[in-house]
Amino acid sequence: MQLIRSCSWEEVFLSWYQNEGENPNWIKLAQERGFASWADWRINGYAKRFDCANAEWGIYEIENPSEVIASWYGGPFRTWIERFYDGAITKTFAELADRSGILEHKGVRSISERYPRETMITALELSDGRMMVIEGMHRACALALMRKEGRPFEGTLKFLIGKSSLSTLPPAGENTDV
């Protein structure tokens, strides 16, 4: 993992917005959950809970990302906890790649067949060294699935990684307090 350059939380959030902030489905979901907008939902429902503004952010280039991400953890998102983590707070992406719900997930399958090189997955490195993906779960699952199926991603990918002082992240999503 090689640091390309440091960056601000605002730059990280802009990348997140570019990935999903104007998607009508995400906007609708945010409003259904009682938030004024996509940004309100992501800031108050996730970023503040994960203390993202106080992390030390950087853009990193990672060789063999399918191999590397297999040992990273999925974020503590309530929907994922219910559907894919068997009630645990998190699972590694190697574990997720063994789940039938991921193996059969049309979105993850589609991404794994045509991985979007230009996007960046966002993760926090917790104080105990664990890497926790907080944005880009489906893309991370796709990379782990590619590894599992013997067709790992060739080359390097860029990731947004924040070094956090937190040792754990609280569950977020679904019933996140507004």
Image (cartoon, rainbow, N blue to C red):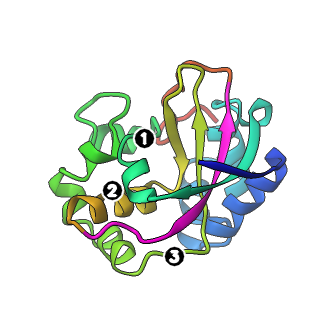
Residue appearing at x 46%, y 57% in the figure: 65
Relative to 34, 40 lies left or right: right
| Magenta-span inclusion, residue 76 | no
Q: Are marks 1 and 2 in contact (CB under 8 Å)?
A: no
Mark 2, secondary structure of its residue: helix
Q: Count all numbered tags in the image, as a single digit.
A: 3
Q: Which one is nearer the viewer's eye here, 155 or 148?
A: 155
Q: Looking at numbered disc 1 in the image, what kind of residue is underneath it?
A: Trp
Picture layout, residue 65 above or below residue 41 = below
**Residue 165 visible within the image:** yes
Label 1 – label 2 distance at C-alpha? 10 Å
Please give the label number shown on residue 39.
none
The residue that disc 3 covers is 116
Looking at marks 3 and 1 on the same chain, the residue that comes earlier in the sequence is marked by 1
Give the extent of the magenta segment.
151-164
The outermost residue toward the left is 100
Separation of marks 3 and 2 at Cα, in angstroms: 14 Å
Categorize mark 2 by other alpha carbons within 10 Å: few (<14), some (14-19), many (20+): many
Mark linked to residue 144 = 2
In the rendered image, the quadrant that contains the C terminus is top right
